[in-house]
Amino acid sequence: MPRITPNLWFDTQGEEAAELYVSVFPNSKITNVSRYNEAGPREAGMVLTVDFVLDGQPFTAINGGPQFTFDEATSFLISCADQEEVDHYWNALAEGGDPGSQQCGWLKDRFGLTWQIVPDELIALISDPDPERARRAMAEMMLMKKIDIAALRSAAQAS
């Protein structure tokens, strides 16, 4: 079966973005950098594509120009085991970005790419078999930017 590789379109920041992402995720690396040549359409020597791997998942960043930008219709979900992981990914990806414009664990990084930073426990709390506990957890989550697992637990357990 063919492998699907997300291709992320940047203006000129593809290499910078790939460097950030491989620094944030474990088992990650840049595997190839190609450059424009004299045939263009951009300046010869400028980075064209950056192939990189984030914990086993291949990606390609392309410096295609300013014609296209990211929006929330495409996002990457990071499933986190605990609050420590949530904090790690949130802090690393929010730096220089726009975490305040999103809610429910979503943030835009400094390149405009949207990430969902979601603790595994969130799904269990908002899917609780007790509909009132699930409702309270969901209502609490809707008030959050970065997910706070302790606050979700507390809300779910409140009576």
Image (cartoon, rainbow, N blue to C red):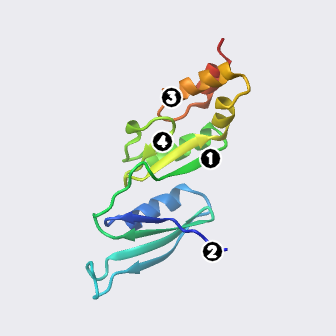
Identified by mark 1, the residue type is Ser
As drawn, the residue found furthest toward the right would be 129
Residue 67, percent from left and from top: 28, 64
Q: Secondary structure at mark 4?
A: strand
Q: Nearer the viewer, mark 1 or mark 3?
A: 3
Closer to the chain start, of discs 2 and 4, is 2
Q: Secondary structure at mark 3?
A: loop
Q: Is residue 27 above or below residue 138?
A: below
Please identify the quarter of the rendering in which residue 120 is found: top right
Task: Give the labeled residue for mark 3.
Answer: 142
Identified by mark 2, the residue type is Pro
Task: Give the labeled residue for mark 1.
Answer: 79
Q: Nearer the viewer, mark 2 or mark 4?
A: 2
Closer to the chain start, of discs 4 and 3, is 4
Task: Give the labeled residue for mark 4.
Answer: 106
Q: Are marks 2 and 4 in contact (CB under 8 Å)?
A: no
Quarter holding the N terminus? bottom right
**Side (left or right) of 136 relative to 59:** right
Identified by mark 4, the residue type is Trp
Q: Secondary structure at mark 2?
A: loop
Q: Secondary structure at mark 1?
A: strand
Q: Disc 2 and disc 1: Cα gap in Å? A: 24 Å
Please identify the quarter of the rendering in which residue 122 is found: top right
Q: Residue at x 29, y 68 (%)?
A: 65
How busy is the neighbourhood of tag 3: few (under 14 within 10 Å), some, or many (20 plus)?
few
Identified by mark 3, the residue type is Met
How busy is the neighbourhood of tag 4: few (under 14 within 10 Å), some, or many (20 plus)?
many
Closer to the chain start, of discs 2 and 1, is 2
Closer to the chain start, of discs 2 and 3, is 2
Task: Give the labeled residue for mark 2.
Answer: 2
Closer to the chain start, of discs 1 and 3, is 1
